[in-house]
Structures are given as structure tokens and as C-alpha cells.
Amino acid sequence: MPACLTKEMITSLVSRCTIAASEAARYLPLISDQRRLLSAKKGVYREEVTQYDKELEKKILCHLLLPDDGYLAEETGYRCGTSGIKWIVDPIDGTLNFARRLPAYVISIAAEVGGNVVAGAIYDPTHQDVFTAGLGMGARCNGYEIKSSNIFELSDAIISTGFSIRPEIRRKQAEIIARILTEVRDIRSCGSAALELCWLAAGKVDAYYEHDLRYWDYAAGALIASEAGADIRVQGDFVIGAAPAISPKFNHHLKI
Ligand code: 2AM
Ligand code: CA
């Protein structure tokens, strides 16, 4: 924990993340299925973005920011602040799911102080679940403490992963899947890195890995999973997390 930060300060940052995510989510039921789909635009790599990513982000920043705060937000970009707090915002993680009416997308907000993520909240509108964590203070879902799984055998483990939009990375990902599929209980892929990290935190899946992520995809989720007891590593754009007892074997299979 950065020396200048008290528990009270971290708790207050967690609350600010939670309130901004929950307030922005109140707007989601107003968006019809048809409007979601029609608003989807494709970028260079055919990745989806909707006008609602941008509208939600505006609402989040409006609830979140004090005048001197910095931020890194997926749709708006970067602002260097002077308050010492930088907010990391993904207004919709799982945009393709959101546009296609698949129930796996979340709002993800983290607070960084002194280069460390110290607070985070992820809101899952489908289940009305809010996952939160403060550095050194554990992880919660709807206020109740959550823990990563205590599984021991990789052969019993459900592994969650996602796929890059870039073909050259997908080829590498296909090789990894081929290597581990026979070693584990099963594999899942829901299309939202932040949600998959919450599943790891809550012990719903036992490990998670993904290449080619952006900071806003995993900033809050990595803290939540780590505070829930998962072993988390970030190497550039690659994020890997596992229940502690299977982590060494899992890393070995991934050739980390
Ligand atoms: P997004 O929905 O915010 O774009 C899917 O495997 C995960 O990868 C999602 O969390 C998705 O976030 C993320 N991702 C990162 N970069 C992406 C890109 N260029 N296109 C689509 N998804 C991307
Ligand atoms: Ca997004």
C-alpha cells in the first residue's frame, strides 16, 4: 500500500468506483436491444464499439471526477491530473456481447495511486452484482467477502480465457488451448476479461489467462481477483491468474 494511503482513503476510493458504476448502469435498461445492435460500429480489427460505450463513459466520468483527478478511459483517452488519483475506466467490457444481447458485459472502474491500483469496482448489470476490492482489504461481491477457489488438481480446474481480435495472436492462442485442453476439467470463454477475473475471484472458475488485453480491461479485475486470494501476474498485455494451489502447474503448462 502506498505509504500516504490510509484504509479510510482506500475505502472512500472503492465507494467512488462503486457509486459511479452503479449510477451509470441505471441508464442501461433504457437502451433497447434493437438500438444496441444498430449502434455497433466496427473498427480497424472489426472490434465492436457502440455509441453507448461513449455515453456510459461520459456518465461515469461525470460521477467520478474531481477537477484535479487524472484518468485513462477506453473511449475518452488520457488526462494527467494533479490530485494523485488516476481513474481507469472501461464503460463496457464485453461490448460485442452487449451489442448482441449476450448477458456477459460489465462496467469496470479502478483507482490508481502512485502507480498502483488500490481500489476497484466491477458492476455486472445482468445479475446486478457489484464486485469490489481495496488493496490489502480483501474482495467482496455485493458486500460479502469472496475467495478464489481452493482446488488442488489442474485436472479438476475450469479455465476461463478470451481471444484476441488479431489473427496472428489467435494462432498462438489456438496452440495454447490445444496444449491445455487435455490437462484441465474444461474451458470457458465469455468475452469480458473483467467479468472472467470476477469469476476467478469468486471461485466460479479456477484460473484465467488472456493475451492482448488493455489496461482498462483488467485493472479493476486483477485487483479484485488478487484480493480474493488468486495468484495474479501481468506481463505486458498478458494476464494470468489462478487459484494458489494450481498456479505453479498452470503456469508451467502455459510455459510461463
Ligand atoms: P472490450 O469489450 O472492452 O473491447 C474479450 O476477449 C476481451 O478482450 C474483452 O475484455 C475485450 O474488451 C478485450 N479486448 C481488448 N482489446 C480488444 C479489441 N481490440 N477488440 C475487442 N476486444 C478487445
Ligand atoms: Ca470496453
Image: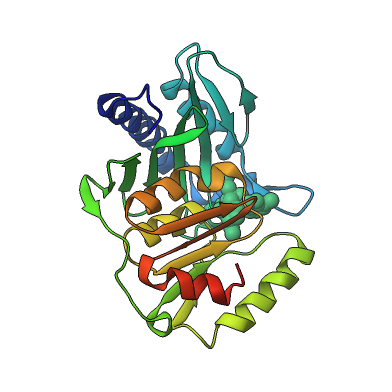
Viewer-nearest residue: 198 or 124: 198
Q: Position of residue 199 (x, y in %)?
A: 38, 61
Q: Position of residue 46 (x, y in %)?
A: 74, 54
What is the quadrant of residue 64 in the picture?
top left
Q: How many marks?
A: 0
Q: Position of residue 197 (x, y in %)?
A: 44, 56
Q: Residue at x 25, y 25 (%)?
A: 8
Q: Residue at x 37, y 21 (%)?
A: 4
Viewer-nearest residue: 96 or 71: 71
Q: Residue at x 58, y 32 (%)?
A: 73
Quadrant of the rendering where the N terminus is positioned: top left
206 to the left or right of 147: right
Viewer-nearest residue: 56 or 242: 242
Q: Is residue 139 visible?
A: yes
17 to the left or right of 31: left
34 to the left or right of 212: left
Q: Residue furthest left?
A: 144
Q: Is residue 35 visible?
A: no
117 to the left or right of 140: right
